Every structure is written in structure tokens, then in C-alpha cells.
Image (tube, rainbow, N blue to C red):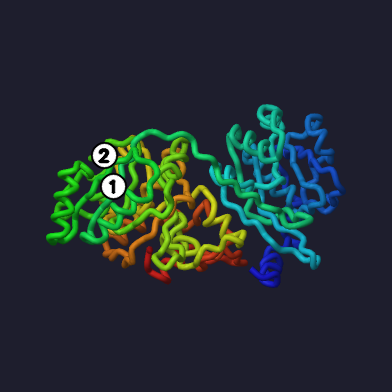
Amino acid sequence: MNDSAYLRFLASKELSGKERAEQERTRFARAPLISVLCDSELELSRQTYKNFARLERDRASEARGDFLLFVPDGAKLSDEALYRFAVEAALDAEFVYCDEDALLPSGGRGEPLFKPDFSPETLLSYNYIGDCFLVSRALFCRAGGAAQTTKELILELTKSSAKTAHIPRVLLTQRRPRELEFQRRRLPAINRKLSIVIVNTSGYEALLKSLNGIEQVSVYDNYELIVVDAAAHDSRLERLYSALERDSAATLIQANPDCNYASMFNRGVKAATGAYALTLFAGSVPKSGDFIERLVAPLLIAEVGATGARLDNPDGSLHTAGVTVGLHGGLFSLYRGIRPCKNDREYLRWAGCTRNVTALSINGLATERTTFETLNGFDETLPAAGFAEDYCLRLLASGKRAVYVPEAVFVLPTQKPPVINELNEMRLMDVFRPLLVKGDPMYNPNFDYDCSVPLPCASPVPPLILHNKNGDWV
């Protein structure tokens, strides 16, 4: 994003005289006292919320405020910052963070960091929250004592917070752009069996490609193969199936003629004996040798219900890095069709690091089998598209999270998007309409939903309007 475009965005969000007057007149039922913790000079005289007190950071334990606001040295707060934090505090949030930008060498503002709603696995990858946050004094006294670094403090506080809130407004300007340190997590010991369920609708060559790729690439050998056959047979495919059965190399399931994709995958997972299941279409080939360990590792966290691989197109461009509900009015991935940009900070934030997402694609989706059974598998009334994304929404409703894992990479075959009939379209709208109205919580509401890369927009068009205009899902 260029500096002039961002300055236009800021101008559209500037506090008006009317808004200032309204904020200053606001009377809270119980106005929280905010202890502002900062070691450098901090201009607070123009704040629209006045119930605060200044204190040095190392005196946090002496603070008498209901809430503590940590502010980094040299930073500036917008005039409405304390008011916005106070509103969230009054709504019972215990931990609150906001969006931010930075001063540039030219003297202007830029390098904005627009953040998702609370994302525990994203926080493990890098400190997306930063060093400006509001925390209740009760929570700080309860959980903040042992932390040695800002990230450790944030991890401890958010782990114990009853309610964590995100303010999608740029309330903080850092004195310089913040360095983001992305951490590749060490893999824990994994020894439980994984069931790889492959739905074959494409025939001999596609299936052989997947089988050979898994065997040649995977460094983890505690897995079983389950092939759900829905392909047109020829002599080569018959011989391959006979060899797989003879060598007990795979479990073969013949799909019924009226089976849809959701039903095929359900039948495959039902036949599985592993603790985890990984779903693939024939023709998908793993690119990373530790793809199994990478996908299973987050599932060891009780609150994580599904993980998803990075999916690349045959030409090396990105196909899927998790699914953003509402992007282009449908179920799309950021950076689709764009080659990985490893020096691009925004690419690394959204496609290059392990992060929480609202939904995942069926290709490369891993889940614990007991979780799958508890949720009754994929919804077979969504036969052509959306059934994996719907599964993720039901996971979220059950209290579990979905995680995108970019280190687990699959190369997809050349494929056509599924055909969605009118009945499927109506069911998709039933399922996804709430998010098409509100927007994806893992995607900042300031972003333009009609763009494949995360760019702020002064007046974002709601995803539902985009869907009505574009009329497609995938």
C-alpha cells in the first residue's frame, strides 16, 4: 500500500468535531479509572476520556486504576484512544488491543498493522498484538507477575482473560515501524496414527501421483491410506487397486453412484482407524516431508479442532492459505494466484505464518477423528462446495479453533471449480450469510473484501453485497 493511499484512509477515519463532542459528553454507568503506563513523554491532554492517571511502567504494581494501559516509549495515542479502550472495559473485556501504524523517516505515517480478532495460534507465531494493550488490574495481579518479556506477559494475560477484545481502529502510532519476529515452532513428539483419506474422481494417474508423493516425501510412517473410488475405471486403475488390496497398502471403498463429495469423505473417515484424519483429492502431492507432523502438532492443543495445509498451484503460485469467508463475496483465499512473497511483511502475516482462520479447504484438512464424529462429519446437504468450511464453523461454535499451517505444503492438480446448483447455493447462503453480513472475524474489517491482498479501505463493501454482485463462491 502506498503512503498517499494510507493517508487518504486515515483522513476518512479522522475524529470529527461532532464525534469529539459526543465522546466527551458520554457518561459511563461506571467509568473505569485507567492507569496509563509509559516511561517517555506522552501527550494526553486532548483525550476525549478524562478518567486516567499517568505512571511509569516499572510502577505497574503500584497502579490504582481499574485498568492498566501499557504504551510503548515514543508512541502517540489518538485523541479517542482512551475513550475506545474505556468502552471495551465497560463491556467487561479484561484484555483489549487495537490496530497501529508508525512514523516514517519522511515524517508521515505508514506501515499499518491491521489485526484480526483474538488469535491464540497466530500469537504463538509472532506478537501481532504488540506492546500497547489494556488489561484489568485484577487480571494483571492474577496472571502477569512471572512474565519476563512483553510477549510472555501477553501470552499469560490472554490465556487467563475471560474476555479479550480487539478494537479495529488505528489508536497507536509507534515512533518507528515495529519489527515482526516470526517464529517457526519446534515439533513435539508425535506417534499416533494418521488416516489419509483420498477421494479419487480423476482416475489412475492422479491417484498414483498422490500415492507416490506421500510415500516418497513423508518422513512420518505411522499412517494408513483410505481411497474412496469414484473414478471411471480403466485397466491401469484396476491393476493399481488390485495391487493395493493384495499388499494391504490401502483400504478401498467404492462410492455409490449418488454419492457427493461430502458423503465420500464421510465414508472414508468412517472407515479410518487412526487418531487423526487428513482429507485429500487424488492428484494432490505433498511438497514438505514433515507435512504430517506439521498438521498434527497444533491438534495436540485441546482447543484446536482442525488444521489446514498451504495449497500451491502447479505453476508455483499460491492457491489457498486458509479460507477468508466473504472475500470476493465467497469462500476465497488471500494471495490466490500470487507467488509467495517471502520479503513482504503482509504476505508473511497472512499467508506465511501459522495463524488462526475461520475456515479451511477440504484439500489438506486434518482433524481429530473423535472430533469429526462428535460433529457428525461433513454436512452432506452441501455436496459441491462449502462443506469443509461449514465443518470449521461448527468447530468454532463448539469452542474449537481452525489453524492454517503454511509449512505443510501440497501441490494441487489443475482443477476446475465445482459446479454449484441452485439448491447448493441456497444451502451455502443459509450457512454463511451471518459472516457475509458481519465479515470474517479473522480478517480486519478495515480491509477491502473485493481485493485478494489485505488493503485498508475507507468504506469497505460488505461481503454480502459483493456476493450479490459477483454471484459465485469459490
Tell me the amino acid under the disc marked 2. Answer: Ala
Which percent across, then down, holds residue 448?
A: 55, 65
Q: Quadrant of residue 63?
A: top right
Q: Is residue 221 left or right of residue 149?
A: left
The residue at 65%/56% (across/down) is 113
Tell me the amino acid under the disc marked 1. Answer: Val
Residue hosting label 1: 197
The residue at 74%/38% (across/down) is 68
Residue lying farthest to the right in this orientation: 41
Cβ atoms at labels 2 and 1 below 8 Å apart: yes
The residue at 60%/32% (across/down) is 160
Residue hosting label 2: 272
Q: Is residue 470 left or right of residue 13?
A: left
The alpha-carbon separation of the residues under discs 2 and 1 comes to 8 Å
Q: Which mark is residue 283?
A: none
Q: Which quadrant would the C terminus be assigned to in this image?
A: bottom left
Q: Is residue 98 left or right of residue 61?
A: left
Q: Residues within 10 Å of mark 2 (few under 14, many from 20)?
A: many
* For marks 2 and 1 on the same chain, the one whose residue lies earlier in the sequence: 1
